[in-house]
Image (cartoon, rainbow, N blue to C red):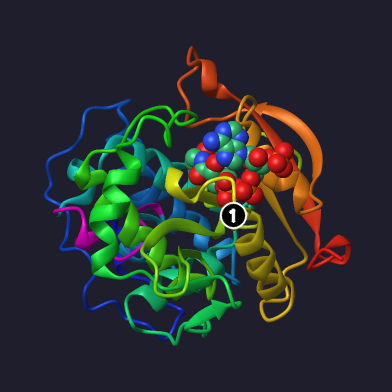
Amino acid sequence: MSGAARHVLARGNFRDLRSPAPEPDAAPPVGEPQARWRDLVDRLLPQAAPAHPDWPVVDDHCFARILLDNACNGPWRESVAAPAWANMPPDRLAVAIDLGNAVLSGRADLALLNRRSLQWRGKRRPPEAPATLETASLRLRRWRRADDAPFARLNADPEVMRHFPKLKSAGESLTEARALDRRFEADGFGPWAVEEPSGPFLGFVGAMRLMRAMPFAGGERPGSLIEIGWRLSPEAWGRGIATRAARLILADLFGRCGLPGVVAFTALGNTPSRRVMERLGMVQAEDFDHPAVPADAPLRRHVLYRLAAADFAGEPA
Ligand SMILES: CC(C)(COP(=O)(O)OP(=O)(O)OC[C@H]1O[C@@H](n2cnc3c(N)ncnc32)[C@H](O)[C@@H]1OP(=O)(O)O)[C@@H](O)C(=O)NCCC(=O)NCCS
């Protein structure tokens, strides 16, 4: 912890009792992401804090907590052993560093990131989401442990994952299921588990706050855009389930949650997913290279669609 940071008081009313133990003195190699991370949270953010009276925290360990939790979609210690700088998976450390840089440059709202972190840690009341969204033929609900096995099968199915960079292992699938459900606690909305009344788990449809900067208009501010997405098992395809579920969810997002609009994107060749976006009345906007897909991968090129709340028609006539 830097000397400057040690002597400033947290401005927020939260002292994080479960914050990470002080990092060991061992210095990460200069130039590596770990060293950039340490410099960001130990020096750059605490030094910038006095010029930002709107920031809810000033201490290095608070910055680390907020950025790591948001990169992990929940309290980071649930999935990473301390010290975080040494043990964070590289992709999540990269997200945490990007978020920190976005805070520094004024592109990310530290108060929003802090609220999400505190809600996950039970220190703030999360926004309430309804237990279910239902129609006579469709039931959207929060995730259950019993969904883990069918979700893992879905994520290991090459047909389902045709438009994703790779299949997911059972462990990766489990981490994703928990992170998807955690989004309800942070934002009051999230990706719903989908089933037909008394039927099996079919996959998910729902909304996610985009926590990484994206290379399209309006995407430069992490946390400011809401994405709607879907992944269903092949038995469910072709019956309009994704479209019907998404309509229910959009009504909730634009009504109860008061969101001004959503985006959706997919690999250029994912026609079924693009058809869902079009059926919802979303407007094709621009193509872009997805930053999480390797540069040489054929799936890197994506297409973006947008929908403003004012243009949402709800149920088709
Ligand atoms: C994208 C997905 C959720 C669509 O779900 P769905 O419930 O089948 O959607 P709908 O029934 O509303 O159909 C959407 C379109 O896909 C078409 N479609 C459905 N199943 C299909 C199949 N097996 N092959 C080709 N097209 C298919 C439908 O005909 C429809 O097109 P249309 O409007 O021209 O008739 C589903 O295909 C899926 O889970 N795919 C794998 C995961 C994925 O790619 N997710 C999106 C990542 S961005």
Q: Is residue 145 left or right of residue 190?
A: left
Residue that extends furthest to the top in the rendered view of this protein? 296
Q: Is residue 314 left or right of residue 162?
A: right
Residue sitting nearer the eye, 178 or 82: 178
Residue sitting nearer the eye, 294 or 145: 145
Q: Is residue 80 magenta?
A: yes
Is residue 53 shown to the viewer in this render? yes
User: Which residue appears at 34% of the width and 45% of the height?
Assistant: 154
User: Which residue appears at 77% of the width and 45% of the height?
Assistant: 278
Q: Which residue is mark 1?
A: 242
Residue 315 image position (x, y, % from top left): 78, 68
- Asked which secondary structure carries label 1, the reply is helix
3 shown above or below 233: below
Q: Is residue 97 left or right of residue 286?
A: left
Is residue 63 shown to the viewer in this render? no
Quadrant of residue 193 in the image? Answer: bottom left
Residue sitting nearer the eye, 199 or 251: 199
188 shown above or below 50: below
Q: Quadrant of ligand 1?
A: top right
User: Which residue appears at 42% of the width and 27% of the height?
Assistant: 165
Disc 1 residue type?
Ala
- Label 1 beta carbon within 8 A of ligand 1: yes
Which quadrant of the rendered structure holds the N terminus? bottom left
Residue 79 image position (x, y, % from top left): 21, 56
Quadrant of residue 38 in the image? Answer: top left
Q: Dot 1: few (<14), some (14–19), or many (≥20) neighbours within 10 Å?
A: many
User: Which residue appears at 66% of the width and 55% of the height?
Assistant: 243
Q: Is residue 128 magenta?
A: no
273 shown above or below 253: above
**What is the magenta range?**
71-81
